[in-house]
Image (cartoon, rainbow, N blue to C red):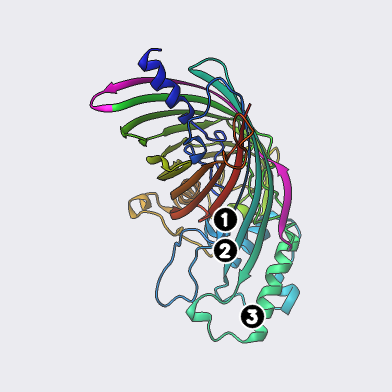
Amino acid sequence: MNIRLVVFYALLPLSLSATGPVISRYIPLFISSSAQAVQMPLLRPTFSVTTRNGHASNSSSFVNEPQEMYKFDGLMEMGGLYDFHEIACSAKEAVPGIVSPFYRETGADTLASRQLLFGAQSSVSYYGLDLTAELPLSSRVKCGFTVPLLHVEARQRYDFPILSADNMVSFAQVEQTHRLRQLLHQDLGMVQKDWIINNVGDLSCWIEYAQSWSYIWLLRALQVGGRLSISAPTAKTEDVAYPASFALGNPGSWGIGLSLVPRAEIKEAIWLQSPVSLVVQTPSLRTQRLPVYGEPLQFGVLQGLVRTVPGITVSWEPTVIFQHFIDNLHLFGGVSIMKHYSDAMTDRRTNQATPSYLTRTTVPQGSHVGIPSGIDGSLLAPRGQAGLAQLQQVQKKIYSSWQRTYLMLGVQYELVDLFAGVKYAPTLNLNFNYCVGATRAARMHQISAGLSWRF
């Protein structure tokens, strides 16, 4: 047999193993996986069952000053800080006949002069089961699909006081402040309980091609693989009644991903690979919460149709694979860097009597925000009401972008001893993904375990 074909047979099992072009700032997915570290028989269908679970309790911190009692790193703070006065001001403008929670609770504006900044925290835990099938079409081409099943628990908690200036607030006023928040959430249709759901994630399918060369450029082997993948928006999107909820897949969009994986064997059974991927998502039109002015997106007092054009997502995952590190044991390690660029949103409500932050040109009377935080000084050129309104659009667009970095570790073991009578023994795959950095994304640590069968 031609030596190049032999090398190709050895490399083909190292093809891509992503579950699809699904982009989420909460639940991470990766291109590389130790599940493809072992050389599997060619032209054999493969079926895999993988369980994965993860937990996240914080994100990046916007404020980290010594005098603060609280770091603003809650998952519900990725879109901005929870300013109670700002939400109450927006509700008064947007909801006809609403009674100020201050008057309803106290009969006067007792706490209206105090800054009521809450810590909007959340934790997310998920348990997933991925069913994956791969079918070789030829010695160089194969296709496959993945069906993910998810159980997600998103819990919410609101802390007050969180600033050093409010450290001397009496216990009675703390309790009263929490009641004010509960009354306002009730008026806006926000439930107090946690968001717990079982759902199918985005279904994905792909087709991939690989080409290889042996003994080229002082390398034992070189391979270039490519994959075109598509995901369908079958997962549940965020629930407007739950501020802690989020889309379980691409938020109402189809995902189209293109991945390129150059790979080289630098020494016997030691491989270096550098997967690069680009994912685009189709525009979506769905009912969302929409801020009147400065409140975060998930606490927007308006509800209506919003058209979203997602930004592109790019990722890079340099990895190293040690095949047969010990007999049938294989090791895998790498780094994953993913960046999602800003989304573009358009207000598509039929009734726009109350302007949203996307359409307004003036600042709401009595707004407690003023100039949005986190805005570069060079953007302050616009003056007056229209200028401040534009700054809110800029800020929220910045908040829709995010980035995260993961350390990936994996182990795979061929179960030839346990399945001595089976022609093709299954393989056990274990992976641990540790988030080492995130900007406006959940710091979710994730583990997975799975079995792969070859027929």
Toward the top, the furthest residue is: 1
Rendered view: 351 above or below 74: above
Residue 190 visible in image: yes
Magenta stretch: includes residue 49: no
Rendered view: 284 above or below 125: above
Mark 2 closeness class: few <14, some 14–19, many ≥20 residues within 10 Å: many
Of callouts 1 and 3, the N-terminal one: 3
Say if mark 1 contacts mark 2, CB within 8 Å: yes
Q: CA distance from mark 1 to mark 3?
A: 23 Å
Residue visible at 53% across and 83% down?
167
In the rendered image, residue 274, in percent from the top left (x then y), is placed at 37, 35
In the rendered image, residue 227, in percent from the top left (x then y), is placed at 49, 25
Query: Does residue 382 appear to the left or right of 193 in the view shown?
Result: left
Question: Which amino acid is tagged 2?
Answer: Tyr
In the rendered image, residue 95, in percent from the top left (x then y), is placed at 72, 56
Which residue is label 3 attached to? Answer: 174
Query: Does residue 264 appear to the left or right of 433 in the view shown?
Result: left
Label 1 residue SS: loop
Q: Quadrant of residue 254?
A: top right
| Mark identifier at residue 339 | none
Label 3 residue SS: helix
Q: Quadrant of residue 85?
A: bottom right
Say if mark 2 contacts mark 3, CB within 8 Å: no
Number of marks present in the image shown: 3
Label 2 residue SS: strand
Q: Nearer the viewer, residue 375 or 442?
A: 442
Which residue is label 2 attached to? Answer: 82
Q: CA distance from mark 2 to mark 3?
A: 16 Å
Q: Magenta segment range?
A: 193-219
Which residue is label 1 attached to? Answer: 296
Mark 3 closeness class: few <14, some 14–19, many ≥20 residues within 10 Å: some
Query: Does residue 222 appear to the left or right of 72 in the view shown?
Result: left
